Image (spheres, grey):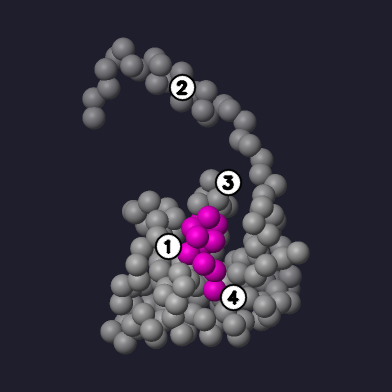
Amino acid sequence: MKISKRYLLPLITLSLFIACSPKPKSNRFKITNLNDEITITDTKTKLEWVNGSEFKEFDGCKGFPKKPTNTEAFIREAVFKHCENLTFAGHSDWRVPTASENQRFVIATKSVNITPYYTIKACPRVIGARGEKIVSINTHNTKPIGEINSWVDGTNGGVRCVREVK
């Protein structure tokens, strides 16, 4: 891509302005570590999200890799059971987030440079509930961050459980 010389100085000036602008500090997210089990609390929505464990083999996204037998019904049941049975960071009231909760979390953490743990290859998308169905929310692929897609059998995805805080 060739840039005209007449646009070069304004472009450099704008780049310097952006680079030197103070980064807004966000108090929206609170990261808590309880016995190496880490959560991210969104103080705006009053939701606490599983982020994972530093020294255990559990990141914040419980993956469900694509397999021929992993149909939407199979994944949906596994996802809901996982969150309902999860005890993490001293809490056992975890649930599957809705699609819109998940979307807001993915976009908001990205906007303040918080990167939740998504270390498993099975979690390029997170699962959200939409009524009786599940959908996938893009976390860091080439598609737009936070994009909600219908679940397609065989999709790689994982769930990040959430709970309400008071």
**Mark 3 to mark 1: distance in Å?**
19 Å
Q: Which residues are magenta?
A: 96-106
Kind of residue sitting beneath label 1: Ile
The answer to which of marks 3 and 1 sits earlier in the sequence is: 3
The answer to which of marks 4 and 1 sits earlier in the sequence is: 4
Kind of residue sitting beneath label 2: Leu
The answer to which of marks 3 and 2 sits earlier in the sequence is: 2
Q: Nearer the viewer, residue 2 or 70?
A: 70
| Secondary structure beneath label 4 | loop
Instruction: Give the quadrant of the C terminus.
Output: bottom right
| Secondary structure beneath label 1 | strand
> What is the chief secondary structure element of the magenta stretch?
helix
| Secondary structure beneath label 3 | loop
Spot occupied by residue 98 in the image (x, y as percentages of width and height): 52, 67
Query: Which residue, given by chain and number where applicable, does mark 1 sit on?
Result: 137
Q: Is residue 31 above or below residue 133?
A: above
Kind of residue sitting beneath label 4: Arg
Asked if residue 103 lies in the magenta stretch, the reply is yes
Q: Residue furthest top?
A: 6
Query: Which residue, given by chain and number where applicable, does mark 3 sit on?
Result: 112
Residues packed near mark 2 inside 10 Å, few (<14), some (14 to 19) or many (20 plus): few
Query: Which residue, given by chain and number where applicable, does mark 4 sit on?
Result: 95
